Image (spheres, rainbow, N blue to C red):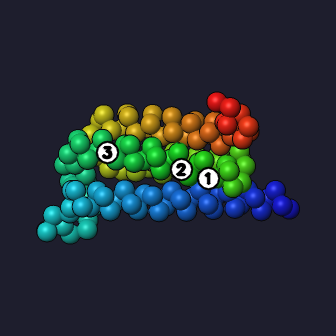
Amino acid sequence: MISLFRVLLGITAGVLTIFFLVMAVEIFSAVVHPLPDDFDNSPEAMCQHVAHYPDWVLGIVVLLWGRTAFSGVWLAQKAGSYGASTVVAVLLLAALGFNSSMLPYTPWFKVVMPGVALAAIAMALRAARSKPAPHHEIANA
């Protein structure tokens, strides 16, 4: 029962972390590439807006999403387990794939973004597994 609770806690912590960090990325995006005044909230208008993202904004978004993926998966494993981090990673990759397939991002972004996300997930899994060096080893280094 405790292990199930830890897995659920890890999934919840990871998903909430990703949710809040994605909101921060969206706020950044809205500040540096705001919606036009005549934006009518239609899917077509959103596609047109996304198609005109400057490359420098997308480059920063790639880095921020990488950090988001790392943080959510790392926290899911630390708070829960490898199973929790796997669920969070799968949900994150599914959301990324859905977002990428629905919006007309530039081709380089659609190639780079999944690679960065996968690398961030792999680094998070490795970092969450590693144990810190004992205090006496750090003091003698």
Q: Nearer the viewer, residue 16 or 43?
A: 16
Gap in angstroms between the C-alphas marked 1 and 3:
22 Å
Q: Residues within 10 Å of mark 2 (few under 14, many from 20)?
A: some
Q: Amino acid at mark 1?
A: Leu
Q: Is residue 28 left or right of residue 35?
A: right
Q: Amino acid at mark 2?
A: Ser
Q: Nearer the viewer, residue 13 or 128?
A: 128
- At horizontal 20% and vertical 63% (from top left) the residue drawn is 35
Tally the marks. 3
Q: Residue 71, labelled with which disc?
A: 2
Q: Is residue 67 left or right of residue 27?
A: right
Which quarter of the picture shows residue 6? bottom right
Look at the image and tell me in which quarter the C terminus lies. top right
Labels 2 and 3 touching (C-beta < 8 A): no
Secondary structure at numbered mark 2: helix
Residue highlighted by disc 1: 75
Q: Residue 60, labelled with which disc?
A: 3
Q: Nearer the viewer, residue 103 or 123?
A: 123
Q: Nearer the viewer, residue 85 or 136?
A: 136
Which quarter of the picture shows residue 122? top right
Residue 136: give x, y in percent of width and height: 74, 37
